[in-house]
Amino acid sequence: MSELYGRFGGGLATIFVALVLLWLTGMVLAPNIMMIDYALRPNLPPAQIGGPDDVYSFDNMLYLANEGVHRAIFFKTIWASALVAFITFVVCYPLAFWLAQHATPAQTGLAILALTIPFWINEVLRTLAWYILLAFRGPLNAVLLSLGIIDDPIRWYGNGGVLAGMVYAYILFMLFPIYNSIESLEKAQIEAARDLGASSWRIHWRVVIPHAKAGIATGCVFTFMLAAGSYVAPALLGAPGSRWFTEIIYNWFFEGGDWNRGAAYALVLLVLCLAVVLITLKLARVNLADVAK
Amino acid sequence: MSHSVELQDIGMTFGATRAVRDVSFAVEGGEFFSILGPSGCGKTTILRMIAGFLEPTEGRVLIGGRDMGGLGPNQRPTAMIFQTLALFPLMSVAENIVFGLEARGISRAERAKMADELLKLIALEGYGDRKPGELSGGQRQRVAIARALAVEPQVLLLDEPLSALDLKLRQHMRAELRALQRRTGVTFIYITHDQSEALAMSDRIAVMSAGVLQQVGAPRDLYDNPQTPFVARFVGETNAIAGKVTEVAEGFAVVEADIGRLRGRAGQRLSVGDAATLYVRPEALTSGTADNKLQATVERIDFEGAFALAHGRFADGSALVASIPGAEMEHAPEAGGEAMFGFSADRAVVLVDV
């Protein structure tokens, strides 16, 4: 703090500190405290708010624990998000490795441009594109039918559709951290491993992946969080059988009219996501500061 | 018996550049062989072709008599020591050393035993659990050598591994490398741009310039009998006096230069009338009388410890450097004055200009 004042002088430093505090209170603390407050109160008619029944309790959370369908969807959302992160990793790793170690600068530029262009379009529209591609009478089924790979069109909407939509939506969040971390790996290390007789698998397992660990963990954390909080992909590409927990939260707020229960559900999701992320980072021995970089 | 490594007319073209052309030489088993040349001369390209990181566009590489064409670096009986060493920073020293054995599927217990043996070989016992980052430059160097030796290569390829060390350590590591090579009997092929390094360590040296092999020979041989002007100038210090050949007889030639008629050994076939240069080493120039006499203005005397170097200019403005042994320092010419230098004809070499 004193360094900040030393460097920028009293006026400017005070403005910086005030802005940070404003950000923290306005953007982080206030909404979350509101949500916790909502989550712990019962849903009451306006007349009874502030009355004798308006007391803090865990009833809203317990409701989720006792409601079998919601509970199942909650856990499915968690593991399916992990699956999304894993599949995104599997898709991105080879590409990131190629871009970082083998591609010429021109190829890297072109590939990154090609990957970035779709992100100039709104997420809803991008997901709608998949909605069209995966339609029962859509282009994907038509191509597969004409190639003779399938005999009858497949219903893609549902788990498969949601997975595809999410992997596509979050690919850059995985690609860039991994690319950055692999790029800093000295080429000679890969050559040395190869020269010492290591197979490609071993080179990746022992040299590249350990080096890129922080990037991989960062990518996985991003993708997992985004997937767990995703709404558009499951809403558009899902089927009744593939409901996502965010859809249930949405329903409590906008259809059930029970904001308190919705807030409680959201809070539980937030806490569990945080736990999963922290445990993952702990296991990968990566600290939060590395991820922030 | 077949040679340890043999290059047959190898060439390498990158796009429009011919990095290496028509290079052939053979390295014998157990030899310390250096490839010497300025940066960009193609020496690293040659090393990478031997290692298998590059496939020559022309010619063949044979190791132990076997054609290496189409074999990757993991399939060749070579191990490379990289300029940056390329130790794996996240693995312990012991893991680094036995990485090649791990890749060969050798059991953990066996690997631990080998790691201990190799750590002993490089005098780093007890350092096995450290990370490479915790070692000094010289220690890391030794770990890189042990890691390469662990896979029991027939040929060890070294890509200027000493260039990052400071002078004292570099000199120490030279001796250590040489001793290690003697002890293990492995063929070493050593790349360097530092001629004193090559002269000090090698059994034989191949000198490269602009992708072309200039000469292969023992250090002494290259120094005394350079066959090309490049070798004469690049290996060791020399005085070059340009002129025209006026006389060739019995292995000697006379060069008519602006500063006089000078006689030296004919380093190659010469004919009268050739534009040629006479090369004479600084230590061959003495102040005493000899076959050839040269007058020069001494500009300065650089004291180097065991000897001193007299820098001067001939009447035509070309530079002269003469070495004065420590014992004769009292008789050294004065800076600023005129002095006579002489050399005997068999200490000078005449080569045709190219």
Image (tube, coloured by chain):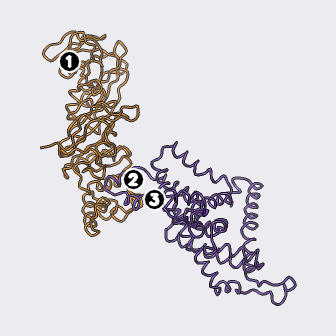
Left/right placement of residue B325 relative to residue B313 reads left
Q: Do tag 3 and tag 2 residues touch (Cβ < 8 Å)? A: yes
Give the CA separation, mark 3 to mark 1.
Answer: 61 Å
Note whether B242 is above or below B14 in the view shown. above
User: Mark 1 sits on what residue?
Assistant: B264
- SS label for mark 3: helix
User: Mark 2 sits on what residue?
Assistant: A189
Q: Colour of chain A?
A: purple
Q: Colour of chain B?
A: orange
Indicate the chain on which mark 3 is placed: A
Numbered badge on residue A211: 3
- Looking at the image, the residue that sits furthest to the right is A47
Give the CA separation, mark 3 to mark 2.
Answer: 11 Å
Numbered badge on residue A240: none
x, y percentage for residue A219?
A: 55, 62
Q: Quadrant of residue A278?
A: bottom right
Q: Do tag 3 and tag 1 residues touch (Cβ < 8 Å)? A: no
